[in-house]
């Protein structure tokens, strides 16, 4: 529908050749641009899949799937009426006829053409470079080939010690190969680092078990004796290896442009002007295939910037690409490395400052102009925290302080960096280079009501790419909030001037167990009268008491603190009836239990459905029937599934290795054990888990707060994902875990979440707001950086040990069951009108009730 | 002229919470807080279900209130007025505690 309409109005056809990161970014930007409706867009991609993240390619070996790496949300192209031809390489370009022709024989006429053909890995012309096991590192298919070689081999060599080469070396380590890096230049990362930085990087990488051979030229590759291949070097040395991975730079893919007669550079690359137009006025080139001002940019951010310029130009808006900064910050094999501007001090008059900390393995170098006023370049290895600050000084040409070295010296006490705090930056400063977000945009977003990092991410996309700018953006956010006089109000509600986290600690430290006590000690008073609380603070208090002391919802002093779901141990539905969800750990249930559920549902006239979390739900139970229903369920071996509580809901699992022909591990047993370990655990929000027995991911574990996926080497643990209104894929937290490690990490992580999260904050938002993000969480949970692990585990053990079934507790005590009567003064039962649909009951609508269509179902018992 | 009727003992109520009662064929919500009992209709006028007695009580801006357990709209317990939609009211009924007993007047 949308597409037909779209095509009718389309005046111009745009053909995009290439669906890599930059090609896709172009489409994303075009779709959002004002003139999109006038364009009919056709995209060709030679790979079998849509754009994916090549920057994080190596994470494919630490558990990410091709789907995880995808940059395209499902149906994005379809929904926007963009036609895409995958697995179909464009082989000819006719500039006179303005057509392109693909390998499968399609010829498409265009009004405008965008070449985003990218680059190919350069393979040095060495004899034997085509031997088996000689590979490149560019596509997911290349990764599959690497996997295949790694499966039978032991040793791998990366040729090239640049950025990509070191990234590839990480992949070889992840594949379990004994890894070597061979670099022709005398040091690693020769473009970005100086000698001192490179030497430190080499030492750090070697500590991780990677052998680094610099100043080595490969003469030829021949058949090996102990391995598949043997590399012979110019100096007579040799190295036996199964895999040779070439990562010696990239070359622009300009062959199509060349054949068509477009102007290309002497050393390759399609020549473009500041509008990203080639020598033909209707043909753009963007990304790694384009040559701008003599430069080929092998980074993704300049490609994205070019994509934006091309889109703006197509929309007849003034835009120009004026080159890009090549500064980079990354984590190579766990080592922070950053390079800014010209770190070599090629200008003879330049001055440099070097800080080297041997014991802590930190190297920092600043290159400044002769007058000491301007920053020319910097190198940071081992500690790149200063990157954001230094980059902004460089990009905005800010005047340096009197002692520039204060910018890289460790800050022990007196602070000099204040001068370069967020306020010193001009609004034009680009903070997030992945999405080209300026400080001005952040300022505007804050003025528009964004108060948290999560808001900023959602509104501006800043910090959602590589994440390198999060610290800086957070500083700007906080500074702006303070300036606006927005005292960030983290008060729970009008009754308490504290966050949930603060109340949690107050209750714990002061041993507070009742709401009255909490209110008396810490609550606000209204006109001299003590407040009564509200549904916000009372529930938060109830939740904290449950997390801390496992207090029971139906105790008289706890009843007022619970919302109806917790008070009646079921979920209130729209007509005031409740749903009953017994726990079915791991989704495994016996035929006998299934029969019991059917019998109980029949007896009480309930509607039954399997819900989204693999549980069988009995709907329409009236309050006064609940205790009897529970009694019968418990007699049949069921217990409460806590489906009403902010607690562990379900652990979804696939069939697993017991039955599935692909399963690698027993996901059902794992799910049952997880569920039994964490059942009843009260937390700031509901928690869901998933366990998949293989990477086919039938349990959708990556959409859960805690997800496990079995691999041949153990469990991969994913954390802080969720479905729901704002879906978020979980992050890979740790790999190759044993079951004991899984429990230990999950114990610590959940307990840390319970202690520190805000009220009703899901794990995903919690992580988004956690300063330091995933890395910090990993440090706390895995490395015990806060020294909390033992305490967290002990608290979890205590909660686990004090678990009791809520339903069982309710029916054991007549005082509790008393509350389930429909009316306090008579034995009558409230009438409950239903309508029959597809052979089951459903709540009558208001109209049906008024029209008298509704029937009242009498229970059969 | 409506008459006060005996409903139940105060012991049948839970402090800072609500219960439902059936009086003259009508569903009434009784709330017990700050030593007083407050009576309103049990019907949620926005969600059209008999659930108000199961809402949480407390105070907002110094006024005693009950929050609907369905969509959390707040109602003043003394006037019945909805905080969020000032033209929507719960019916309120005169009520009192006498000799440890709850009395409500429902026409």
Image (cartoon, coloured by chain):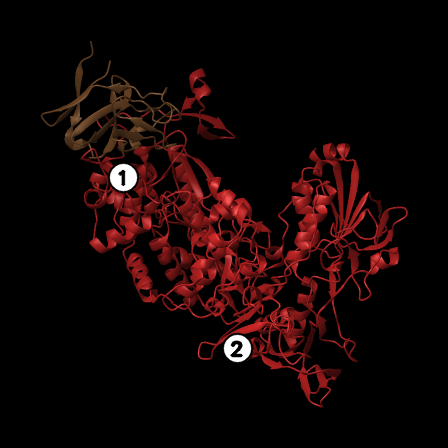
Chain colours: A red, B brown
Please tell me whether residue A171 is drawn above or below residue A85 in the rendered image. Answer: below
| Direction from residue B91 to residue A117 in the image, left or right | right
In the image, A495 versus A307, the foreground residue is A307
Where residue A276 sits in the image (x, y, percent)? 75, 51
* Relative image position of residue B38 (x, y in whole percent): 22, 25
Task: Kindly identify which residue carries mark 1.
Answer: A495
Image quarter of residue A167: bottom right
Is A245 located above or below residue A746 in the figure? below
Q: Are marks 2 and 1 in contact (CB under 8 Å)?
A: no
Q: Which mark is residue A89?
A: none
On the picture, is A601 further left or further right than A527?
A: right
Within the image, what quadrant is residue B24 found in?
top left
| Chain on which label 1 sits | A
Residue at the disc numbered 2: A204
**Image position of A810 (left or right of A213):** left
- Check the image and name the residue furthest to the left: B99
**Numbered disc 2: what chain?**
A
Q: Who's the residue at 76% across and 32% down the image?
A: A9
Quarter the C terminus of chain A occupies: top left
Q: In the picture shown, does residue A415 fall above or below A22?
A: below
Q: Give the percent coordinates (x, y) of residue A625.
A: 32, 34
| Element marked by disc 2 | helix
Question: Which image quarter is the N terminus of chain A in?
Answer: top right
Q: Residue furthest front?
A: A371
């Amino acid at each position: 529908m949308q597409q037909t309409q779209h095509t009718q109005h389309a005046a111009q056809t745009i053909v995009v050749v290439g669906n890599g990161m930059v090609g896709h970014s172009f489409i994303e930007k075009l779709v959002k641009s004002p003139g999109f409706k006038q364009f009919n867009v056709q995209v060709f991609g030679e790979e079998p899949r849509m754009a994916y993240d090549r920057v994080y390619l190596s994470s494919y070996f630490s558990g990410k799937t091709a789907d995880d790496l995808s940059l395209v949300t499902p149906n994005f192209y379809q929904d926007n009426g963009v036609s895409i031809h995958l697995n179909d390489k464009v082989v000819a370009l006719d500039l006179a006829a303005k057509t392109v022709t693909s390998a499968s024989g399609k010829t498409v006429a265009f009004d405008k053409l965008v070449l985003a053909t990218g680059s190919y890995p350069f393979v040095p012309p060495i004899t034997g470079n085509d031997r088996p096991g000689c590979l490149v590192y560019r596509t997911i298919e290349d990764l599959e080939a690497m996997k295949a070689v790694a499966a039978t081999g032991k040793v791998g060599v990366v040729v090239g010690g640049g950025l990509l080469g070191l990234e590839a070396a990480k992949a070889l380590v992840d594949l379990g190969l004994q890894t070597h890096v061979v670099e022709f230049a005398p040091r690693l990362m020769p473009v970005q680092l100086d000698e001192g930085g490179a030497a430190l990087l080499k030492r750090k990488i070697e500590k991780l078990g990677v052998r680094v051979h610099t100043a080595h030229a490969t003469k030829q590759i021949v058949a090996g004796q102990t391995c598949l291949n043997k590399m012979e070097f110019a100096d007579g040395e040799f190295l036996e290896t199964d895999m040779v991975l070439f990562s010696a730079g990239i070359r622009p893919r300009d062959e199509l442009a060349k054949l068509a007669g477009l102007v290309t550079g002497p050393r390759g690359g399609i020549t473009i002007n500041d509008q990203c137009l080639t020598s033909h006025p209707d043909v753009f080139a963007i990304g790694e295939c384009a040559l701008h001002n003599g430069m080929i940019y092998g980074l993704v951010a300049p490609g994205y910037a070019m994509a934006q310029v091309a889109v703006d130009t197509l929309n007849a808006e003034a835009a120009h690409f004026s080159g890009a900064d090549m500064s980079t910050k990354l984590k190579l094999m766990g080592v922070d490395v950053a390079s800014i501007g010209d770190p070599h001090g090629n200008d003879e008059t330049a001055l440099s400052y070097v800080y080297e900390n041997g014991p802590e393995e930190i190297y920092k170098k600043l290159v400044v102009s002769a007058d000491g006023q301007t920053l020319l370049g910097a190198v940071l290895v081992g500690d790149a925290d200063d990157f954001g600050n230094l980059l902004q000084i460089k990009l905005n040409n800010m005047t340096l302080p009197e002692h520039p070295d204060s910018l890289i010296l460790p800050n022990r006490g007196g602070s000099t960096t204040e001068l370069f705090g967020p306020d010193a930056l001009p609004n034009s400063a680009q903070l997030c280079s992945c999405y080209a977000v300026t400080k001005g945009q952040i300022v505007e977003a804050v003025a528009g009501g964004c108060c948290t990092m999560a808001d900023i991410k959602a509104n501006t996309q800043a910090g959602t790419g590589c994440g390198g700018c999060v610290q800086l953006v957070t500083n700007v956010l906080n500074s702006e909030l303070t300036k606006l006089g927005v005292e960030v109000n983290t008060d729970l509600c009008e009754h308490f001037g504290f966050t949930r986290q603060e109340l949690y600690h107050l209750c714990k430290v002061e041993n507070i167990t009742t709401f009255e006590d909490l209110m008396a000690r810490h609550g606000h008073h209204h006109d001299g009268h003590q407040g009564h609380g509200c549904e916000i603070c009372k529930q938060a208090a109830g939740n904290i008491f449950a997390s801390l002391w496992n207090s029971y919802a139906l105790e008289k002093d706890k009843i007022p603190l619970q919302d109806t779901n917790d008070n009646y141990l079921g979920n209130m539905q729209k007509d005031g009836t409740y749903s009953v969800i017994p726990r079915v750990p791991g989704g495994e249930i016996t035929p006998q239990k299934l029969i019991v559920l059917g019998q109980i549902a029949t007896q009480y006239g309930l509607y039954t459905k399997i819900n989204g979390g693999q549980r069988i739900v009995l709907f329409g139970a009236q309050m006064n029937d609940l205790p009897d229903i529970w009694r019968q369920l418990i007699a049949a071996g069921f217990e409460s599934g806590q489906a009403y509580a902010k607690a562990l809901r379900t652990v979804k699992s696939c069939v697993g290795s017991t039955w599935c022909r692909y399963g690698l591990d027993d996901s059902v047993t794992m799910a049952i054990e997880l569920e039994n370990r964490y059942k009843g655990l009260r937390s700031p929000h509901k928690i869901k888990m998933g366990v998949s027995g293989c990477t086919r991911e039938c349990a959708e574990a990556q959409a859960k707060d805690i997800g496990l996926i079995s691999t041949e080497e153990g469990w991969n643990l994913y954390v802080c994902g969720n479905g729901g209104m704002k879906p978020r894929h979980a992050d890979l937290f740790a790999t190759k875990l044993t079951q004991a490690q899984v429990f230990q990490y999950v114990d610590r992580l959940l307990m840390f979440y319970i202690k520190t999260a805000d009220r009703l904050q899901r794990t995903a938002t919690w992580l988004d707001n956690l300063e330091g993000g995933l890395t910090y969480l990993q440090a706390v949970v895995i490395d015990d950086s806060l020294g909390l692990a033992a305490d967290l585990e002990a608290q979890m053990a205590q909660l686990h040990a004090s678990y009791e079934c809520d339903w069982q507790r309710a029916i054991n005590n007549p005082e509790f069951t008393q509350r389930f009567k429909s009316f306090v003064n008579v034995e009558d039962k409230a009438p409950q009108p239903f309508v029959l649909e597809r052979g089951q009951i459903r709540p009558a609508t208001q109209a049906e009730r008024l029209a008298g269509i509704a029937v009242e179902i009498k229970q059969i018992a | 002229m409506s008459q006060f009727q005996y409903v139940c003992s105060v012991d049948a109520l839970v402090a800072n919470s609500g219960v439902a009662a059936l009086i003259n064929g009508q569903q009434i919500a009784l709330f017990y807080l700050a030593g007083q009992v407050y009576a309103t209709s049990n019907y949620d006028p926005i969600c059209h279900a008999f659930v108000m007695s199961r809402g949480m009580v407390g105070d907002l801006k110094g006024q005693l209130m009950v929050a609907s357990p369905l969509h959390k709209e707040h109602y003043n317990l003394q006037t019945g007025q909805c905080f969020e939609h000032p033209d929507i009211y719960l019916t309120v009924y005169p009520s009192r505690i006498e000799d440890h007993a709850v009395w409500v007047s429902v026409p």
